[in-house]
Image (cartoon, helix red, strand yellow):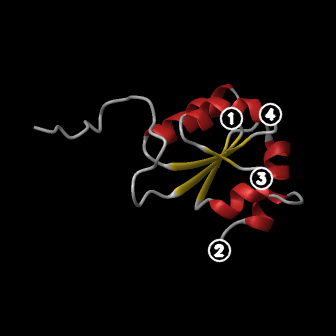
Amino acid sequence: MTRSPDPRRRGKASSSAQPGSMNVGFIGLGRIGRGMARNLLRSGARLVVFDQNADAAKPLIDSGAEWAASVGALARQASVIFTSLPGPSQVEEVVLGSGGIAQNMRT
């Protein structure tokens, strides 16, 4: 008899997202952001990530997330975007700056 996976079980994220899941973007993979992004990945979201420090994304990519080469590239792929950034000036730059979310988001 084959058992269905228990949805309450927390385990390593699979490399493929669940069918019908939305593309989720996550920008800012520091101490706080990395954990939040990992939980999104574990939930089955199709996760696209970006951080100024590409090494910060490696554990997530190894677990199935996709790397975006820039904020704009992430915005073009994601249906919803989360940020975990140090402060208001960084959020303003990522959202409103040249090549940022506002210029590249999906419509």
According to the picture, the residue beneath numbered tag 3 turns out to be 71
Q: Quadrant of residue 61?
A: top right
> Farthest right residue?
98
Q: Amino acid at mark 3?
A: Val
SS at circle 1: helix
Mark 2 vs mark 1, foreground winner is 1
Q: Is residue 102 above or below residue 55?
A: below
**Residue 27 drawn at (x, y percent):** 70, 44
Q: Amino acid at mark 2?
A: Thr
Q: Is residue 11 above or below residue 72?
A: above
In the figure, is residue 24 to the left or right of 9? right
Q: Are marks 4 and 2 in contact (CB under 8 Å)?
A: no
Q: Quadrant of residue 3?
A: top left
> Farthest bottom residue?
107
**Residue 18 drawn at (x, y percent):** 40, 51
In the figure, is residue 104 to the left or right of 18? right
Question: What residue is rendered at 74% in x and 58% in y?
Answer: 73
| Label whose residue precedes the other's in the sequence (3 or 4) | 4
**Residue 95 drawn at (x, y percent):** 78, 56
Question: What residue is rendered at 31% in x and 30% in y?
Answer: 9
Q: Are marks 4 and 1 in contact (CB under 8 Å)?
A: no
Residue 53 tag number = 4
Near mark 4 (Cα within 10 A), the count class, few <14, some 14-19 or many ≥20, is few
According to the picture, the residue beneath numbered tag 2 turns out to be 107
Q: Amino acid at mark 1?
A: Ala
> Farthest left residue?
1
| Label whose residue precedes the other's in the sequence (3 or 1) | 1
Question: What residue is rendered at 44% in x and 56% in y?
Answer: 21
Alpha carbon separation for disc pair 4 and 1: 8 Å
Q: Amino acid at mark 4?
A: Asn
According to the picture, the residue beneath numbered tag 1 turns out to be 57
Question: What residue is rendered at 85% in x and 44% in y?
Answer: 89
